[in-house]
Amino acid sequence: MNVRALTLLTGLIWLGAAGAATPPDPSVKEEAVETLTTVTTIATPTGAFAARSCPNCAEHFLSLTSDTKFLVGRTPVQFADFKAIAGEKARFMTVYYRVADNIVTRVVISAN
C-alpha cells in the first residue's frame, strides 16, 4: 500500500472516530449545589429531593432520573455503593442539575 492511500485511510478513520463522539450541547445550562452528605441526603436513585448548601440555606428542589450518574471522585458507581459510601462519614458532595428543568445530571462525592 502506498503512503498516500495509507494517509487517506488513517485520516478517514480519525474523521469517523471524531464524528462518533457526540459533543455536549452548549445550549444546556447547568448549575451546581455544593453541600455535605450530612446536610443533603439522597434516599433513592430516582425521584425528587431537596438539596441545600447549609442547614439554614434555601432549598433547591431537584429530580433524579434513571439517567442521573453517581460518582465517587471521578469513578462512576452504582447507587447502592454511592449511598453506602456517602453514609460512612461527612463528605463533600456536588449536585449538578439542568437549570431549565431541575433534573440532576450527576452527583459527585469526594473520594476521601
Image (cartoon, grey):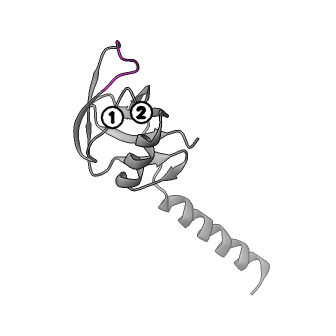
Q: Amino acid at mark 2?
A: Thr
Q: Amino acid at mark 1?
A: Thr
Location of residue 2 by image quarter: bottom right
Name the residue tied to disc 2: 37
Q: Give the crowd class for mark 1: few <14, some 14-19, many >=20 residues within 10 Å.
A: some
* Residue 28 x, y percent position in the rendering: 37, 35
Which of these two is toward me, 30 or 46?
A: 46
Q: CA distance from mark 1 to mark 2?
A: 6 Å
Relative height, residue 21 to residue 73 (above, below): below
Residue at horizontal 33%, vertical 34%? 41
**Quick one: quadrant of the C terminus?**
top right
Left or right of 56? Residue 63 is left
Q: Hey, which quadrant is residue 86 in on the image?
A: top left
Judging depth in this view, the residue of 13 and 76 nearest the camera is 76
State the mark number for residue 61.
Answer: none
| Residue under pointer 1 | 41
Find out whether residue 53 is within the magenta segment: yes
Helix, strand or loop for the magenta stretch, by majority:
loop
Pointer 1 with pointer 2, Cβ within 8 A: yes
Looking at the picture, how far across and down is residue 63, in whole percent? 25, 37
- What segment carries the magenta color? 51-56
